Amino acid sequence: MKNLLLLLYSVCVWECTFSQENASLRSKTPLDFRLRFNLENDSSVVRLFDTSFLRLVPGKALREYLRTFKDKFGYLNALSLQNSTTTEDQYAASFTLDSNFIMRLSVNRSGKISSMFIRPKVTSDTSVKHTNNIWLKKFNLNIPGSILIPPAVVHPPIVIFVAGSGPTDRNGNNEFGLRTNAYLKISTALLEKGIGSLRYDKRLSGEIYKVDERSVLVDSLVDDLRGWINKLRIEYPNSKIVIFGHSEGALVGMVAAQTSPVDGFVSACASSLNYEKLLLKQIRSKYQPDLQIEAKSILDEIKMTDKMNSSSSPLLSTIFRPSIIPFLSSIIKIEPTVEIAKLKCPILFIQGTQDLQVDSNDAILLRKHCKNGQLKIISGMNHIFISVNNDEASNINTYSSPDLPLHKELVPIITSFINLIK
């Protein structure tokens, strides 16, 4: 069931471009789905799904999944309308036995289910109450963070954590089921070593999740980080400032550190590819050649015009949703290997051998493009700093297991690097 959950999660489509025709048909579909799901009428419930969805999740797999889901979560109580646009209606489901998972359906103008989004709820036992709060005031936005300063250390070094891709908050979690507490765990461990830290909510995450996605550019994220660096320079003038950039956060850190210099830089699990090549690589691993060609054409258009004038197929509509185009336009022009070469401070590259998202060769290539870097390849560590074996399913399960310990080599490597900065 977990593999099916991951498959369904990866193909969810929230923004299909349709008109508001056949509104009555669209409103009838959730009622039909509830009836057929509860009656276990497997064949007829599959016919409610759009063909584009069924190309990725064949009918047999979908029927198996729905039966398993019903056995675990019980009967479908209701499907509540959450949002209605000219393109689709979005519904949230509730069940009789278990409320720890969220199911959402999108119904297109033809009355077909175009996406089924299923994820764990982020419950209170995996979220952390924020303490030691600090704020960065940015025009009409107050960005919240958490700062940890070792009480018995005079002028301790301070690490700024820059979150990875997506709406990832200060602790390394998001509302789509990512529950790692990765940054919280590292910062807590560093505190015991006499090293302070600052973690902050990225735009679209945590306490500032209501930010309009269209306004978020890579320049916005870079400017936020510069603001935090400058704030720490003022409030802790005698402390060394070190950036810890995770995944996409490393790219943000590379750019920010050029105009707001820091004393050290940690690039953790970062790609050496620019965002366009990275995106196309991910699309090649999931989709058919015709969609790869379409994605390349869209990215070329965005590079040339900063816009996407053509519409994308339903299977690519989440990746190229209109609200994300400004961000894509801003980030695909940045070359990590070029930016890292501009930094003058000491650099530590950290990469795990069990990373499902970034290859060890990325860290090696980034290291080759700078004169003042050291590379640490950690055997058995995955993308969120957990020790795992070669089993992919077990690796994926760690992304929703916030209580797992960090890889034992990680914190000593970071500590040693920071303590040697002059």
Image: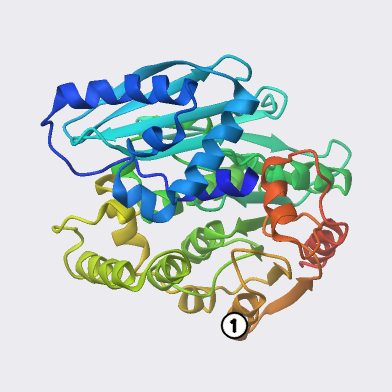
Q: Is residue 162 visible?
A: yes
Q: Residue at x 49, y 48 (%)?
A: 60
Q: Residue at x 54, y 56 (%)?
A: 249
Q: As displayed, is residue 197 above or below residue 37?
A: below
Scheme of image coloration? rainbow
Q: Quadrant of residue 303?
A: bottom left
Q: Residue at x 76, y 73 (%)?
A: 377
| Picture coordinates of residue 250, whole percent (x, y) | 56, 62
Q: Looking at the rendering, in which quadrant would you find the N terminus?
A: top right
**Residue bearing mark 1:** 365
Q: Quadrant of residue 169?
A: top right
> Could you say which is closer to the camera, residue 86 or residue 414?
86
Specify whether 323 is left or right of 244.
left
Q: Looking at the rendering, in which quadrant would you find the C terminus?
A: bottom right
| Picture coordinates of residue 90, whole percent (x, y) | 32, 28
Q: Residue at x 51, y 48 (%)?
A: 61
| Picture coordinates of residue 130, whole percent (x, y) | 66, 26
| Picture coordinates of residue 318, whole percent (x, y) | 34, 49
Q: Residues within 10 Å of mark 1 (few under 14, many from 20)?
A: some
Q: Is residue 224 visible?
A: no
